[in-house]
Image (spheres, helix red, strand yellow):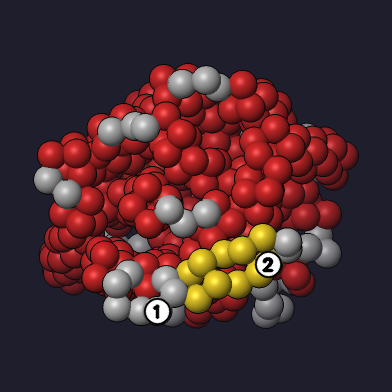
Amino acid sequence: MSSEQGGALTLLRDREFAALSATAFARSQAYSTVLIALALYADQFGTTGSVEGLFGTGFALVQLALVLPLGRTVDTGNAKRYLLAGLVVNVGVFVGFALVESATQVILVRVVQGLGASLLWITGSAVVGEISPDDASGRWLGGYNQVGAFSSLLGDLVGGYLLYAHGFTLTYAVLSAVTIGAFVMLFVYLRDDPGGRADPADATGLETFRGLLALPTVRALSLFRMAFAVGKMTVIVFLPIFARKEFAITAFAIGWILAGGKLTKTLLQGYTGDLTDRVDSRHRLIVAGALLYGLGTALVPAALLAEGLVEPITLRVLGGEQTLGGAFLVLFAAYAVIGVADSLRLPASMALFVEEGERLDSVASSMSVRSFSWKVGQVIGPAMAGVIKEFVSTAAAFFAAAGIVFAATVAFVVMYARFEATAAESPGAAPGD
């Protein structure tokens, strides 16, 4: 199988990959649908920018606290149990979201959602990396992400429609059914105790993380991800809110905007996963993707100019009318660019972390370091953007996010070049070796 080419469709013949992909499907669909719901909650409760920032920060805080110990626990324990627990938590989250009556309650449920997402994302990615063939980790991770991207696309389209046409309760009931289905597949098809190759007696968690951070590639990628996450999370949290509160775009149409990025991401990520396995300089894919992401982020505020310049069109879709103006077109295009950017960046980043983690037989710990660095930026980003939005402007928040993405990319290039120069003087220590 390792020599075969192709994306997730080919890999889904493997029952274990299919079961793991089901968890990615449930997780991503829920995440995308909830982001649209957050825009509706922000409009319904009349929130300020600072409170809206907490919608993202609350989600990330619990993940920041759990990501490192969870990674080590998965390396030495039964990963299957953590995946099943994550699915159970998510069902509880949907019940909570259906019952919220204030912005404060939304933030609290987002905290619990962060717990479920941590269990599924860190554990699922680590298990895929562990059970994949040695020469095809990029392909498996790319295919796994391709399923998640496709599910996220469905979350935007189907979730957006359900929220628009049927409200919160039915939407969360559908998400619960999908999650329960993933639970059954995982329970039946995934082997017991997948991965977990590290012996707890060999090293403490602290020693493992110190060993990982001693690797130049891990250090460079971790610092890059901290800064990059600040910019990216601004887009993820605030673009749907921007579309809803500034332009009164419906939940259904917001789903279309987000689908532009998810479609490009779904179509390209399988190919870029294969590309990741073939190229030597994987960091160049990360740089290209990051620069493109910064460009897409900088395009978002142009929606303010385009709204009055383009004649709106009205479409009748599924029994309702959708009025789409210049803002919709700009936001759709910006998010499509962002989808291409993520397709380039994600498989290469994940493959490098898996490769480095395999040196210490601690793939899950490596993935948790990857996630921890992201969570630092994920906590800071929405809070920072919310304050900028509230006291300066929404456009300023997006421009600041784009600037941070560009600065993080430049810093990553400089760090990686320095590591390569050091490695050239000391053969055998090259980044990513």
Question: How many marks do you count on the picture?
Answer: 2
Judge whether 357 appears above or below 143 on screen.
Answer: above
Q: Look at 63% across and 45% down and name the residue there.
A: 163
- Name the amino acid type tagged 2: Val
- Left or right placement of residue 175 versus residue 124 in this view: right
Could one spot residue 87 in this view of the protein?
A: no
The local secondary structure at tag 1 comes to: loop
Give the residue pinned by disc 1: 311
User: Residue 28 appears at what percent x and percent y?
Assistant: 60, 49
- Left or right placement of residue 85 versus residue 293 in this view: right
Judge whether 419 appears above or below 166 on screen.
Answer: below
- Name the amino acid type tagged 1: Glu
Quadrant for the N terminus, please.
bottom right
User: Residue 418 appears at what percent x and percent y?
Assistant: 13, 64
Q: Look at 45% across and 43% down and name the residue there.
A: 39
Judge whether 424 appears above or below 196 on screen.
Answer: below
Could one spot residue 162 in this view of the protein?
A: yes
- Left or right placement of residue 291 versus residue 333 in this view: left
The local secondary structure at tag 2 comes to: strand
Mark 1 / mark 2, whichever is N-terminal: 1
- Determine the image quadrant of residue 426: bottom left
Residue placed most toward the observer, 298 or 392: 392
Q: Look at 35% across and 63% down and name the residue there.
A: 432
- Left or right placement of residue 342 versus residue 220 in this view: right
Tell me how far mark 1 sits from mark 2, CA to CA. 19 Å
Q: Look at 29% across and 78% down and name the residue there.
A: 309
Give the residue pinned by disc 2: 317
